[in-house]
Structures are given as C-alpha cells and as structure tokens.
Amino acid sequence: MEKKITNIFLTSIEQDKKELFKNKFILGIHEKTILTKILPKSNIKSIHAWGFVPSEKNLKIWQNLNIDDWVLFYFDGRYSYASKIIQKEKSEQLTAKILGKINQNRNLVILFSKIFKIKKGFQKTNLEMGLETTIPEIHKINMIQAKEISVKKIIEKFGSIESYLEIIAPKITHKDISDIIPSSMKKEPKRIKSITLRRIRDTKKSINLKKVYNNKCQICNYSFPDYVESGYSEVHHVWPMADNGDDDFDNMLVLCPNHHTEFDYGIIQFSQNTQKIEDIKGKIIGTVSFKKGHKLNKKNIEFHNERVRKIFES
C-alpha cells in the first residue's frame, strides 16, 4: 500500500487579525476548560488555533486537510510560522470559545500542538510549492494547498518537510564527517596570504533613491507599514554589480523583498514596453512606476532579460 503523502497548506494573516493571531496562535490557548472540551483524552497543556471563514474555496480545501499535514503562515513579511495539524473542527460554538464571539464566523478551526518559527520568502516558497509566481492581491492569500508533485520533490530533495523548513537539522555522525574530509585535510593545512578585491557599493545613492520613493516598491507600491514605521524597501541592481554592472541610478530599482527576490532568481523580466513586468511565460504581472528624473538604461534592461533567457534555457 502506497504511503500517503503529507500535504502542505499556505495562508496569510490579514492586517486586522494580527493581534488575534498573536494571542491565539503564537501565544496559544492554556485554559483547562477549553482544552478538556476540545481534547478530552489528551494531556496537552496548551494548543495553538486558527480559523477560516467557510467560503466555497476554503470549504473545498478544508476537505483535504488531514492530521499531520503542515500549514505555513505568512506573517511579518515572510512565511514566519509553521505547524502540524493535530485536529480540525467546524463549529461556531467552539470558534466563539477559542477565538471570541466576534470571530465565530471563522468556524473552520485548525488546531496545533506545537508551532515553529521559520524564515521563508513569499514568492520563492510559492514557487517551490508549485503555485503561480505572482498571486493576486500580492502578499495576501487565504488558504491554498501546495501541489502534491511539488511536495514530493521537496521531500525527495530534503528528506522531510521538517528539514526543508530547517526545523530539524540533519543528523551527521562522526563517520559521515570522516568520510567527507579528504585525507589532505586531516592534517594542518598550509597557510597562504591572499588579497581579495571587491567593488564597494555607494550606499548613499541607495539611501537617496529609497527616499525618492518613500521606501515603496516601484512595482506593488508596498512598504510594510504595519511592521516598519518608516517603511521597508531594498535597492536592486538590474545589471548585478557582481557581473560588472554600474552602481548608478539608471541601474537601480527600489523594490519590496518579494519582487527583489523574483528579479534575483530571474523569475520576472521586462516586457517590450520596458515599464511593464512579465513572468517567464510572458504574462504581464505589473508595471514599474518611475519618479521624474529616474529611468533605467536600456543596456541594463537588456542584460537582465538576456540573463533570464539563459537561466530557463539551461
């Protein structure tokens, strides 16, 4: 009999539910009366819970949720928490007790015994899960199930979902270490002097360009205002400096971490209309906004698009 594969589900926390998420999921529920009602035969001293509105889409995914499946939570600008399901309940009465009466419409409740802190980027993780490169209402997803074939690939590559999430470090025995160390390294290696040359970025230019755009991404206009009071952005060199690109304004874009990662991995490129951004299939997914006096040099755009082409041809 074929072993059932563990599923992975992904969700993001709405801005107006941040405090509820902190109190009920991150801090957990410790009231004995609630624990006894939910898990009468268990000795668990606390649980972590989250609930979903029973929309048609959520109900379909809800049917696929099973014990020991994983849920990844997008919170504070990345997938920050992961947990294994121990139980699921569909009950407004239970939801009212766990999440409060004001939230009893979120009656698709998932229960967890442990939570784990993780650091997984939004777009890269979605790609690894077999999801679209850009999800509508960027940075916001309700409940999505990862593609089964993608989960299988993750388990084949990392050995387990825990290892992929870097929750459990792989066990390495003394013999394993001995086997991978060349004999020449088992004695004190020779020491030599070396000189490293590297190009120094002009951080002042980056800081000034961020100010021009008020730390807002030139593609999605997002700046993480709920997490960083002054906003947060990153400067991307379209033609990487490591490949001898210029450290000039006409080679720089102000981006959020997610779009920065997409550019770095060659997941998105410029369309023929250079203010439009498209995915690798040629689908337009956004527009780059430019302030007066700022534009990209055509050579930098061409370099990036050529790099993307080479990545996906190799």
Image (cartoon, grey):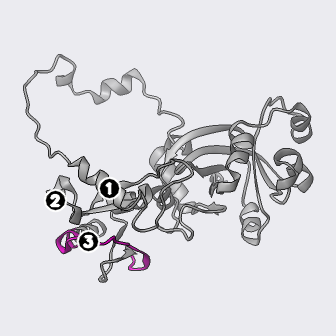
Say whether residue 194 is visible: yes
**Residue pointed to by mark 1:** 235
Identified by mark 2, the residue type is Asp
Identified by mark 1, the residue type is Val
Q: Residues within 10 Å of mark 2 (few under 14, many from 20)?
A: some
What secondary structure is found at the residue carrying circle 1? Answer: strand
Q: Is residue 92 above or below residue 85?
A: below
Give the CA distance from mark 3 to mark 2.
Answer: 14 Å
Query: Residues at badges 3 and 2 in contact (C-beta under 8 Å)?
Result: no
Give the CA distance from mark 3 to mark 1.
Answer: 14 Å
* Quadrant assignment, res 83: top right
Identify the residue at horizontal 66%, vertical 61% (top origin).
143
**Residue pointed to by mark 3:** 295
**Residue pointed to by mark 2:** 246
> Mark 3 against mark 2, which lies toward the viewer?
3
Give the CA distance from mark 1 to mark 2.
Answer: 13 Å
Range of residues picked out in magenta = 281-303
Quadrant placement of the N terminus: bottom right
Identify the residue at horizontal 41%, vertical 58% (top origin).
214
What secondary structure is found at the residue carrying circle 2? Answer: loop
From the viewer's perspective, tell me whether residue 6 is left or right of residue 101.
left
